[in-house]
Image: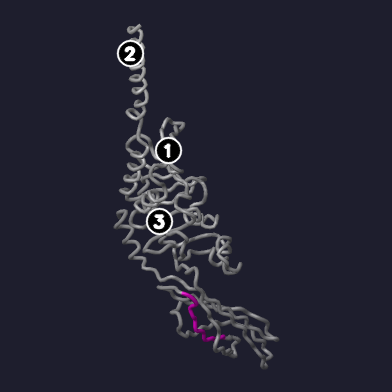
Amino acid sequence: MPRCVVGSFLVVVAALVLSACQMSEPAANGPDPQGAVEGALASLEREAMIGYRFPGGTALDVSSTGLAQGTLFPHDQQVHILRAGGSVYVRGPAEYWRSQGMSAERAGQYGARWARSILALDPGRALAPNSLARAFRSAIPPGTQAERLTLGDGTELFDVDGLQVTAAQPYRVTSFRPSLLGPLGQQVLGNSPVELQGLSADGLADFRTALRRDVDDLGQPFVAGPAVAASVTKNTMRCAASGSCTDTVEVTPQLLGDAPQALARLVLTSSVTSNQLGSRECGQELVVPLNEPVTMSCSVKFAVPRTGGATKVSGVPTVTAEPVAVLDLAGIKQEIASTLGA
């Protein structure tokens, strides 16, 4: 009888030892999700530049110094963006500017050129590598459950609340949900998961080329947000015997709102009419300082009949105005060269 008791005891002890070994096996051999996430975020912080890759093949590249070039999706509208010299420039369709509250006519003008703009989220700051890593740390509480995934090519990942990182070293962030950056992140990045990757040497060269191309294409961008009031204060019409008539106006462009480093782009259009000679149109475009009076004029030429005689000529001038940005192109190109090389 005692031998039976001892034998049972030994069996129980053996079973307990075996059970303890089986429970510790995953901790000893499996990767640590928390360590993988921290390693991936530390690696992200050290990146000099990163590439965002969106569904459909569009992309955005951002440097740690604040340069950015590519595509974003504010208000569900796809727009092209450039960030350089500390400012964000947007080139988007008229529909995008209509969604900002512009009239159809004004939105059409903005849709045809670049505009310095303020987005809900500044890509050169919020989407720079170190800022992104900090945002992920703030958005994901410690101890958040991780889900292990295996991709079709065999790559193993941890998914932690929509942040996906590699499960094996070198740890890196592979994709994330825009909602991890809050409502503003979703507003400019959309709702679909975004892939994240470091830039290769070829990718860096492409980034540099794209930045230079867009800087050369900027022209004289509008400044979105403020407006310029430009009412005609003086108007004179002078005609010569040769049939040449010049309409002259005086305008003072007044800025409504805030627009540092800006000028006014004025467009004069005049409809010049005579009952005997018909009608002609002329115009002039000027870029001038804000809040200072300026004189504008344009001329038309009528065919004067040989019979002679006097005729009355009148003009109806209109002036439209928009704020335009003052650019330091040399400084922007130097910034690109300093960051990405010549």
Question: Which is in the foreground here, disc 3 or disc 1?
Answer: 1
Residue matched to label 2: 10
Q: CA distance from mark 2 to mark 3?
A: 63 Å
Sort mark 2 into few (<14), some (14-19) or many (20+) by Cα contacts within 10 Å: few
Give the x, y percent position of residue 336.
33, 58
Type of amino acid under label 2: Leu
Residue matched to label 3: 126
Type of amino acid under label 3: Ala
Q: Is residue 55 above or below residue 323?
A: above
Q: CA distance from mark 1 to mark 2?
A: 39 Å
Type of amino acid under label 1: Ala
Question: Which is in the foreground here, disc 1 or disc 2?
Answer: 2
Residue name at image x 62 percent, y 80 percent? 271
Residue matched to label 1: 146
Q: Earlier in the sequence, mark 3 or mark 1?
A: 3
Inspect the magenta stretch and tell me whether residue 254 lies in it. yes
| Span of residues in magenta | 246-257
